[in-house]
Image (cartoon, helix red, strand yellow):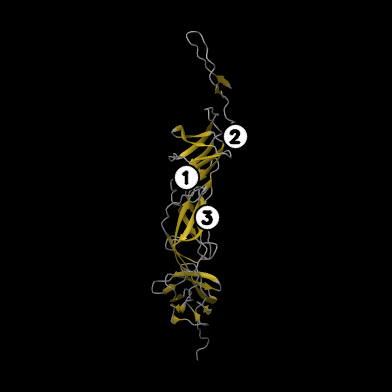
C-alpha cells in the first residue's frame, strides 16, 4: 500500500500543510489459478442435447461453455481451431464462483480446443486453463445401405431380391451406415425398429415380432452420434407369404408305351418306365414328384396352372407309391396328394405251343 500527499511552498519559503493522502494499492499477484477451470460444454441443438464430454462430438455450433473461477473476475475464453487460436468471448464469475459463456458467433466445423484465462479487477491474469476439446459436426450423415434381406426359413433361404416373396416373417436386414450410429427401419414410413451400428459401420436388424402376411416397402435412415439424421434410403419391397399352397389337382399319371396307353389308376400295372405326371397347381409354384418318399424330380407350374413331369431316367421294374407336393414362390410347401400305387413291369410275355392237335 502506498500513500501520497502534496505540499505547496510560496516565494517566501512558507510550506503549506500536506494534502489528504492519496492511497494507491499495488497488486501484482494474479488470480488463484487453482480455481480456474472449464467444467462443461452444453449442447442445446438437435436430437441429442446435454453436456458434451471432452473428445465427444456435438452438432451445436454455439454450445454454452461453463467453468469455475474467483468471484468478480473476468473470464476470457479462447478456442484453437483450424483457423488458429483466438478469443470467442468474455464473461464474469458470479458470487458462487461459476461462469458460463455462449459464443456470439458459430464455431468452425472440426476440432475445437477451449481454454480460459482469468483476469482480476486490476488486470492481473492467470495462465491458460487446462484445455477442453470437443468436435463440431453439423452435417447430415449419408443414408445407410440395405445390402441384404435374408430369408432364413423353409426350403428357400437365399437372400431376397427386390420384389421377391418370402415365407420368413422375421427376415434379417443387413447393411452399412455411419459408424456407432443408429439405423431406424420403416415400413411404408412407419417405424418398425432400429439397430445399433458397430464401429466398423455394420448393422443387422431382425424384427422382434413376426410380420403379418402382406406387402412390405422397407426404408431406413441413419442417425450419427451427435443426433443428425440422414435422408431415407430407397425402398426395398418384398412380400411375406406364410400360407401353404393347395395340393395338386387332377393328378394324372399317363402310360405312353405299348399297346395299352392312357391314364393309370391306383393299383394299375404299366409297361411304361417313364410315365408322365401332370395336373393343375398354383401358377409360378413348383411341383415335386416323389416315389416312396424319394424325390424323382420337379416341374415348374405355368401361368395357366398346368405342369408336366417325365422322369429322365427309366424307373426299374417294381411297385411304386407316387405322391406330389406343391411349393410356392415364398417357399411354403402344401400337403401331399394321396398315394397312387403303380407297378412297372416291362418284361415281355412269351407264348409257346407244346402240343399241336
Of tags 3 and 1, the one toward the viewer is 1
Question: Residue 195 bears which disc, if any?
Answer: 3
Task: Determine the secondary structure under disc 2.
Answer: helix
Is disc 2 in contact with disc 3, using a CB cutoff of under 8 Å?
Answer: no
Depth check: give the residue in front, 202 or 53. Answer: 53
Q: Where is residue 200 in the image (x, y as percent from the top left)?
A: 52, 47
Q: Where is residue 331 in the image (x, y as percent from the top left)?
A: 49, 67
Q: Where is residue 120 in the image (x, y as percent from the top left)?
A: 54, 30
In the picture, residue 310 is in which quadrant?
A: bottom left
Q: Which residue lies furthest to the bottom in this view?
A: 357
Q: How crowded is mark 2: few (under 14 residues within 10 Å), some or many (20 or more)?
A: some
Residue pointed to by mark 2: 35
Q: Which residue is drawn at 52% across and 44% down?
A: 42
Is disc 1 in contact with disc 2, using a CB cutoff of under 8 Å?
Answer: no
Question: Residue 60 bears which disc, if any?
Answer: 1
- The quadrant of the image that shows the N terminus is top right
- Earlier residue among tags 2 and 3: 2
Q: Which residue lies furthest to the right in this view?
A: 34
> Distance of mark 1 from mark 2, alpha carbons?
27 Å
Amino acid at each position: 500500500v502506498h500513500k501520497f500527499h502534496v505540499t505547496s511552498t510560496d516565494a517566501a519559503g512558507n510550506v503549506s500543510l500536506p494534502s489528504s493522502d492519496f492511497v494507491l494499492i499495488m497488486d501484482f499477484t494474479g488470480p488463484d489459478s487453482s480455481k480456474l477451470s472449464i467444467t462443461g460444454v452444453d449442447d442445446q441443438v438437435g436430437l441429442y442435447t446435454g453436456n458434451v464430454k471432452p473428445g465427444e462430438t456435438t452438432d451445436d455450433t454455439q454450445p454454452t461453455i461453463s467453468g469455475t473461477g474467483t468471484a468478480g473476475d473476468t473470464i476470457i475464453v479462447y478456442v484453437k481451431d483450424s483457423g488458429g487460436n483466438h478469443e470467442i468471448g468474455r464473461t464474469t464469475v458470479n458470487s458462487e464462483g461459476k461462469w458460463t459463456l455462449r459464443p456470439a458467433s458459430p464455431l468452425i466445423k472440426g476440432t475445437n480446443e477451449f481454454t480460459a484465462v482469468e483476469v482480476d479487477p486490476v488486470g492481473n491474469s492467470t495462465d491458460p486453463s487446462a484445455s477442453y476439446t470437443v468436435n463440431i459436426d453439423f452435417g447430415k450423415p449419408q443414408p445407410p445401405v440395405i445390402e441384404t434381406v435374408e430369408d432364413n426359413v423353409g426350403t428357400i433361404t437365399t437372400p431376397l431380391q427386390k420384389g421377391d416373396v418370402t415365407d420368413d416373417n422375421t427376415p434379417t436386414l443387413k447393411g452399412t451406415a455411419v459408424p456407432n450410429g443408429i439405423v431406424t427401419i420403416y415400413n411404408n414410413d412407419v417405424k418398425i425398429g432400429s439397430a445399433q451400428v458397430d464401429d466398423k459401420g455394420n448393422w443387422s436388424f431382425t424384427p422382434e415380432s413376426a410380420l403379418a402376411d402382406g406387402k412390405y416397402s422397407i426404408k431406413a435412415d441413419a442417425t450419427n452420434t451427435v443426433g443428425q439424421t440422414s435422408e431415407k434410403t430407397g425402398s426395398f419391397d418384398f412380400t411375406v407369404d406364410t400360407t401353404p399352397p393347395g395340393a395338386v389337382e387332377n393328378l394324372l399319371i399317363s402310360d405312353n408305351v405299348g399297346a395299352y396307353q392312357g391314364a393309370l389308376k391306383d393299383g394299375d400295372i404299366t409297361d411304361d418306365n417313364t410315365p408322365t405326371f401332370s395336373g393343375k397347381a398354383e401358377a409360378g409354384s413348383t411341383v415335386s414328384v416323389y416315389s416312396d418318399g424319394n424325390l424323382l424330380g420337379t416341374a415348374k407350374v405355368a401361368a395357366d396352372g398346368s405342369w408336366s413331369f417325365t422322369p429322365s431316367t427309366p424307373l426299374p421294374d417294381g411297385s411304386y407309391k407316387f405322391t406330389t407336393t406343391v411349393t410356392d414362390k415364398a417357399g411354403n410347401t402344401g400337403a401331399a396328394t394321396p398315394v397312387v400305387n403303380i407297378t412297372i413291369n416291362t418284361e415281355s410275355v412269351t407264348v409257346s405251343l407244346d402240343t399241336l392237335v
